[in-house]
Image (spheres, rainbow, N blue to C red):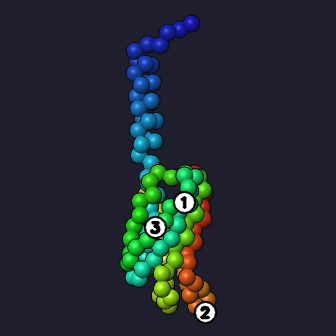
């Protein structure tokens, strides 16, 4: 059986650090709500369901999520203004949803995705 030399051991240590560091650098997932009025909703992932609410535009950091994710955000009062939501990881828009439909407005915007 051949023993590893100093160079090979150094390379393995460096490789381990790079793998560990790259996992730490994974971008968090963010929910962006664009609406001037009051809104509320739910975020459901593998850890359960939590409620969110606010007034006006807001960005919510959801952390480093993987797996199924469902988001519902709705207007608190009826309005003809469009409420839109975007799910972002790093600089990439993963998914969007809004309340605009042909001929009118819905009350809720939905996103349902699987994050790898």
69 above or below 96? Answer: above
Mark 3 Cα within 10 Å, few/some/many (few <14, many 20+)? some
Q: Taking the image as drawn, is residue 37 in sight?
A: yes
Q: Is residue 113 left or right of residue 24?
A: right
Residues 53 and 86: in front is: 53
Q: Nearer the viewer, residue 93 or 39?
A: 39
Q: Residue at x 46, y 42 (%)?
A: 23
Expressed as whole percent of the image width and height from the top left, the position of residue 26 reads 45, 48
User: What residue would you read off at disc 1?
Assistant: 49
Element on which disc 2 rests: loop
Q: Which residue is mark 3?
A: 52
- Between the C-alphas of marks 1 and 2, the distance is 32 Å
Location of residue 29 in the rendering, given as x and y in whole percent from the top left corner: 46, 58
Direction from residue 111 to residue 83 in the image, left or right: left
| SS label for mark 1 | strand
- Please name the residue that numbered disc 2 is placed on: 103
Residue extending furthest top?
A: 1
Element carrying mark 3: strand
Residue plotted at (52% across, 67% down): 42
State which mark lies toward you, 2 or 3: 3
Instruction: State whether residue 61 is above or below residue 8.
Output: below
Q: Nearer the viewer, mark 1 or mark 2?
A: 1
| Disc 1 crowd, CA 10 A, few/some/many (<14, 14-19, 20+) | few
Among the two numbered marks 1 and 2 on one chain, the one whose residue lies closer to the N terminus: 1
């Amino acid at each position: 059986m051949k023993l590893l030399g100093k160079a090979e051991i150094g390379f393995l240590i460096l490789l381990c650090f790079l793998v560990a560091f790259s996992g730490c650098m994974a971008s968090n997932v963010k929910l962006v709500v664009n609406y001037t009025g009051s809104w509320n909703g739910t975020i459901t992932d593998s850890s359960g369901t939590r409620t969110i609410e606010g007034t006006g535009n807001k960005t919510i950091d959801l952390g480093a999520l993987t797996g199924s994710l469902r988001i519902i955000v709705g207007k608190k009062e009826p309005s003809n203004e469009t409420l839109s939501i975007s799910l972002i990881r790093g600089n990439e828009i993963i998914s969007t949803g809004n309340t605009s439909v042909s001929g009118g407005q819905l009350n809720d915007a939905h996103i349902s995705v699987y994050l790898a």
